[in-house]
Image (cartoon, rainbow, N blue to C red):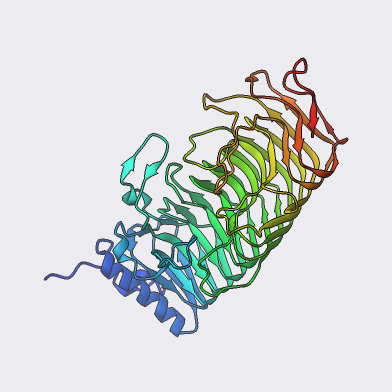
């Protein structure tokens, strides 16, 4: 059998350029092996830069990144994932496992760093997850896909991780997962995913600490940036803490910036600042559906725009969402406390929703200089809220109000306002609708109801 031709390399080609290691641009197996040889050779020499050259699309299965190695994609370079899940030799379990007795479902990984230190992915080139290869059916609002779809990039148990400048597009599943890692910097990258692809979160921060994400553009069908402490966790128990996200622009068919809902270990000390969220089904959210605690979270200096969309995507156009609702009956121990929203300008078809399934699990929610402008802008039906994932009622018939509070303790408003647009369906009601709340300070909230002749501005009971 004739060998596949290699991409040519000349005397000026850097020593760890993939062309020197026999990439063909046509053979997935050969190109996976050649890419891995280049990375391994670089690591064996003490580290350095592995170059993905411009001018060709190189398709690979699983490639393992090594300590002290920078994978650099030249402008015009494309590193693309295989269209066949069986080509991904590196796997980790599916990230949500509600039944501890059930077997793990292995999910392939395209670029995988495991227990690595000082590892980087940089450059102006493109990493393509080849997500369209995993579409079984194109329905009007969401693709139908197999469960076995590869992650694009995973850092597991890594330290001192850097991603800069690169574009990651067309993820088949979660795009970038930080799993049990520490000291991570992601700066100036673009994530450009298909908005109809389910589960293609932009960046998932899972059991990880000291993470800084800045200056990124994220377009994702599922959550833009999401924090978890998920199961199965592979023995990782570090808190998800010391997270800063700033200066990002996000579009999503689900939530822009979100914590939860799968929280099996503590999440704390998180700052989201100076972001713009547009055309999303939910703006910012903190949701605990499992056992542990979320605490000390700040959302500040943001513009948030939401709209209703198909219920295949979680959310009901809430610009702000804080919820404690157990996924299963045995997940009754979760709580949220000390979450602050400061200097937010919000526009959407729904108000802020702050709800818990019972008293005593949601406390310390503070709104400072938050403006909500609520107006009907789509043809999608409203008047219900989305409490998923929960074994309780998923879509309770709660009409839209500026702020909806249920079973929350210590909620304060300072210089906040609700404004209603011209288009107000019958299910638009109060500036504040509160029930079962203690230590509620609402003097700092202004605004009329959607229909002052029928509804009071504030309904507290």
Q: Quadrant of residue 261?
A: bottom right
Q: Between 442 and 439, which is closer to the camera in this rendering? A: 439
152 with respect to 159 (left or right): left
* Image location (x, y in percent) of residue 203: 54, 56
Q: Quadrant of the N terminus?
A: bottom left
Task: State the count of labels.
Answer: 0
**Residue depicted at 47% across the width and 56% down the height:** 174
Q: Between 178 and 8, which is closer to the camera in this rendering? A: 178
**Residue depicted at 40% across the width and 53% down the height:** 172
* Image location (x, y in percent) of residue 364: 79, 51
**Residue depicted at 65% across the width and 25% down the height:** 375
Q: Residue 428, relative to residue 249: is it above or below? A: above
**Residue found farthest to the front:** 329
Residue 195: tell me if it is visible: yes
Q: Residue 19, relative to residue 446: is it above or below? A: below
Q: Quadrant of the C terminus?
A: top right
Residue 10: tell me if it is visible: no
* Image location (x, y in percent) of residue 320: 67, 41
13 with respect to 155 (left or right): left
Q: Between 161 and 238, which is closer to the camera in this rendering? A: 238
**Residue found farthest to the top:** 453
Q: Quadrant of residue 306?
A: top right
* Image location (x, y in percent) of residue 202: 52, 53
Q: Quadrant of residue 102?
A: bottom left
256 with respect to 75 (left or right): right
**Residue found farthest to the left:** 1
**Residue found farthest to the right:** 443
């Amino acid at each position: 059998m004739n060998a596949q031709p290699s991409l040519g390399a000349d005397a000026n080609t850097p020593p760890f350029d993939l062309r020197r290691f026999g990439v063909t641009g046509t053979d997935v197996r050969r190109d996976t092996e050649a890419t891995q040889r280049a990375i391994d050779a670089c690591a064996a020499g003490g580290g350095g830069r592995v170059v993905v050259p411009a001018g060709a699309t190189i398709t690979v299965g699983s490639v393992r990144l090594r300590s002290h190695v920078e994978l650099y994609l030249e402008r015009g370079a494309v590193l693309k994932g295989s269209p066949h899940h069986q080509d991904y030799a590196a796997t980790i379990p599916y990230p949500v496992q509600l039944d501890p007795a059930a077997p793990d479902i292995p999910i392939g990984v395209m670029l995988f760093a495991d227990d690595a230190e000082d590892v980087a992915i940089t450059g102006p080139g493109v990493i393509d997850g080849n997500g369209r290869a995993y579409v079984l059916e194109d329905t009007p609002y969401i693709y139908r896909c197999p469960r076995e779809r590869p992650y694009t990039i995973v850092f597991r148990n890594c330290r001192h991780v850097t991603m800069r400048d690169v574009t990651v597009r067309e993820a088949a599943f979660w795009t970038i997962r930080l799993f049990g890692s520490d000291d991570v910097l992601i700066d100036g990258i673009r994530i450009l995913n298909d908005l109809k692809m389910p589960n293609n979160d932009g960046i998932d921060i899972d059991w990880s600490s000291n993470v800084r994400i800045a200056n990124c553009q994220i377009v994702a069908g599922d959550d833009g940036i999401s924090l978890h402490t998920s199961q199965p966790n592979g023995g990782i128990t570090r808190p998800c803490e010391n997270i800063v996200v700033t200066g990002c622009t996000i579009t999503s068919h689900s939530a822009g910036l979100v914590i939860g809902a799968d929280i099996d270990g503590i999440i704390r000390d998180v700052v989201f600042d100076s972001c713009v969220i547009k055309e999303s089904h939910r703006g910012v959210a903190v949701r605990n559906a499992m056992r542990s605690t979320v605490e000390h979270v700040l959302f500040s200096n943001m513009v948030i725009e939401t709209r209703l969309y198909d219920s295949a995507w979680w959310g009901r156009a809430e610009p702000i969402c804080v919820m404690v609702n157990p996924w299963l009956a045995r997940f009754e121990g979760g709580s949220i406390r000390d979450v602050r929203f400061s200097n937010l300008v919000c526009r959407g078809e729904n108000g802020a929703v702050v709800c818990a399934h019972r008293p005593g699990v949601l406390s310390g929610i503070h709104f400072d200089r938050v403006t909500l402008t609520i107006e009907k802008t789509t043809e999608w039906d409203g008047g219900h809220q989305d409490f998923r994932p929960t074994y309780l009622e998923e879509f309770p018939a709660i009409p839209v109000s500026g702020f909806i509070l249920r079973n929350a303790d210590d909620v304060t408003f300072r210089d906040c306002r609700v404004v209603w647009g011209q288009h107000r369906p019958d299910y638009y009601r109060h500036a504040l609708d509160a029930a079962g709340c203690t230590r509620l300070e609402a003097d700092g909230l202004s605004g009329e109801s959607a229909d002052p002749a029928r509804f009071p501005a504030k309904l507290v009971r």
